[in-house]
Amino acid sequence: MAKRRLIEELLRDAKVLPDNEAFTVIAPYYDELMAEVPYSLWVDYIHRITQHLKFRFESVLDLACGTGNVAIEFAKRGYRVVGVDKSEAMIREALRKVEMQPNLNAEFYCQDISELLLPSQFDLAVCLFDSLNYITDPDALKRAFNATLYALKPGGYFIFDMNSEYALEANLFTQDNLDTDDRLKYFWVSTYDRKRKLCKVDMYFQVQQEDGSLLRFKEVHYQRAYSIDEVASYLIDAGFRCMHIFDAYTFNPPRKKSTRIYYVAQRPIEAVHESQGVVQSR
């Protein structure tokens, strides 16, 4: 009964934020929201992939870095890291955390990943937590791939994950934590438009602030489903070699019901010809 009442209050009282303010109000509370996310295990998996490739790296570009958790994890392991995100509020949180750990070799910039302007090139680029699904315009995704190619040194790798269409169609974003005692509560409802391949997620939040008052707001997020063939073709068109496609956190090919898919692409040392295809995972 209490849960139902809270849902009604959120639906009635939450301030609806415009699309361009997504990841803004939530930024100071984002790490609380993602407290259970195993960032270190994600970085472990990236290491397993690079070991599988026999690829050694010293510098990492973290695309759509959010509050910097993946970038900071790489930096803690001794790498030179740059993180970029188009949300100024999220970058502020990342910078705040780095200021508290000045020994980390990590920098952060507020940039759109389809228009990168960086001081150097990198051995490795990563983009995790289905961030690329938020690019709902295929042409913009192509530009992001192209920008990433030139942000890498020749021979460098780009490793990223994306939600599958199965995950978005199954409405896996529909979830809540309203039965917990957490000061940050959320209630999310997702719907999937199969024709447009768009998943819309209505995200309602309630934060109990230090003075005891309640902050209630709503963000609307959109993710687009891209097929494996689409992603691979965009990578190749950008100039990458698409080396491997994995079911997340394994070295197995994706299954029909895979929810998250990892792509491993390489910027060739020599120019890529249009006839070049995908090297399938083994």
Image (cartoon, helix red, strand yellow):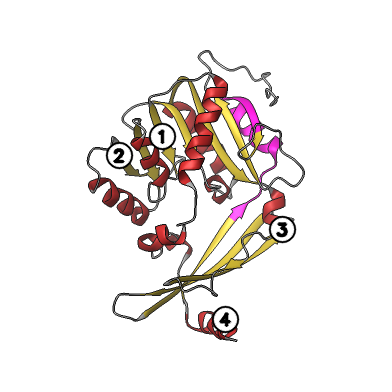
88 up-or-down from 272: above or below: below
Q: Secondary structure at mark 2?
A: strand
Q: Secondary structure at mark 3?
A: loop
The reply to whether discs 2 and 3 touch (Cβ–Cβ < 8 Å) is no
Q: Secondary structure at mark 1?
A: strand
Residue identifier under label 2 = 107
Label 4 or label 3, whichever comes before in sequence order: 4
Q: Nearer the viewer, mark 1 or mark 4?
A: 4
Label 2 or label 3, whichever comes before in sequence order: 2
Name the residue rendered at 70%, 45% in the picture. 258
Where are the magenta residues, as a range? 223-245
The reply to whether discs 4 and 3 touch (Cβ–Cβ < 8 Å) is no
Residue 100 visible in the shown view: yes
Q: Position of residue 173 (x, y in %)?
A: 61, 61
Residue identifier under label 3 = 170
Residue identifier under label 4 = 3
Residue type marked 4: Lys
Q: Is residue 120 magenta?
A: no
